[in-house]
Image: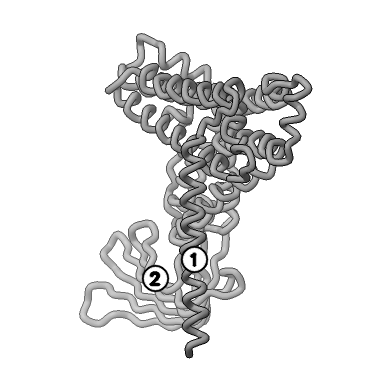
Amino acid sequence: MMGVFVVAASLLILDKMLRLFDFVAVEGGPVGVVFKMLMALIPEYASLAIPLGLLLGILLAFRKLATSSELDVFRAVGLGYGRLLRVPYLITAILMALNVALVFFIQPVSRYYYEQMEYELRSGALGASIKVGEFTTLADRMALRIEASEDDGRRLMGIFARVANDKDQVLSISAKEGAFLATTDNPDTIILRLTDGTIVQDTGSKTPRVLTFTRHDLPIDLPAIEKFRARGDAEREYILPELLRIGWSEGEPEDKRDASQASFNFRLVEVVMMALMPLLAVALGIPPKRSTSALGVFLSIIMVVAYHKVNQYGEDIAALGRIDPILALWGPFFLFAALIVWMYWRVAHVPGGQAIGALETWFGKLTKRLGKLFRRRRHLQIDLSAAE
């Protein structure tokens, strides 16, 4: 179970990691912020990886018992599936409590923290750097271009700056080297110390003034960074007490109440759905007699992920007020629950019953036909090679 959880969470994180690296590279931010943003997304991915890990952990355990005939021994001595599921349901209860803490308290705060880091990265508060080889506009009056950078940005080469003041005078500055220096008296201003360069001052007259220097300090006003918004811009950033207060308050707008109720029911139904995972694991983890088919493993993942997507769609349309959240989210849940209970009943209480017996038969025939096709191709290739 822990192995499946780690694999599932890692796959989700790796997919997001590639996009975050591209985003941070474009914004010119530090690489370390990528890992901070990924850490903030772990609670969101864990809420899906935990049910998958629980399902596949129980499923593979019962599958191993079934394929080694140990399950037949248990049942022969009077131990039914209900008795064998006591410990899996104990584990399920613990993980459901953990998932409640994740989706109702930890996940909203971590999502807000992620949005805050993304905003600060876009605004430059996380140390976004000036892109080498491109013009960068600073404080709406300066254009700066750096040809090359060495020593982690502490040494700059090939610097060109164009500065305009309030008197319509323009300074065109080129320098061989330079470096950024912090000031102690004004944290909103930094100094760009230039070495071996030329200043061309355009005062509006026909002949501009040209000056050369060995060292020149150019003050740069940092752009003002607005404070990030307060938590609660979206319903997924509300914790449980806030959802209950907003969703059932007559003083809130109707669209906000609909969105809060949809978010609350979505999170709740995702947690309650975990109670069905042991039954689904037993129904799909026991293959037919004298069979080692892994179709149930594949089908279980499809069912859980598809149901999660259906819930996301139900939350979206319920948040728009087009349908009642109870119907949009609990309707699919009861249909899903009825299907799982029927599958479990077939396996546990019908002699020789198999919930996906028809699919297993069809899958077995398809596998045999594909095997024959590949064998024919291999024999044909051997015959052609021998003929050559």
Q: Vertical placement of 86 versus 58: above or below?
A: above
Say if residue 213 shows up in the picture: no
Q: Residue furthest top?
A: 250
- In the displayed structure, would residue 317 be above or below residue 365? above
Q: Residues within 10 Å of mark 1 (few under 14, many from 20)?
A: few
Q: Is residue 88 left or right of residue 363?
A: right
User: Which amino acid does the dot numbered 1 rest on?
Assistant: Phe
Q: Residue furthest bottom?
A: 388
Residue that mark 2 sits on: 134
- Give the residue number, with chain letter if any, for mark 1: 374
Does the rendering let one see residue 316? yes
Badge 1 element: helix
Looking at the image, residue 335 sits to the left or right of residue 294; the answer is left
Q: Residue 222 in the image: x percent, y percent?
A: 45, 55
* Colour mode of the rendering: one colour
Q: Position of residue 143 (x, y in %)?
A: 36, 67
Of residue 374 and residue 240, the one placed in the foreground of this image is 374
- Could you say whether the residue bearing mark 2 is in a helix, strand or loop? loop
**Position above or below: 287 against 273:** below
Classed neighbour count for the residue bearing mark 2: other residues with Cα under 10 Å, few (<14), some (14–19), many (≥20): few
At horizontal 37% and vertical 19% (from top left) the residue drawn is 325
309 left or right, relative to 150: left
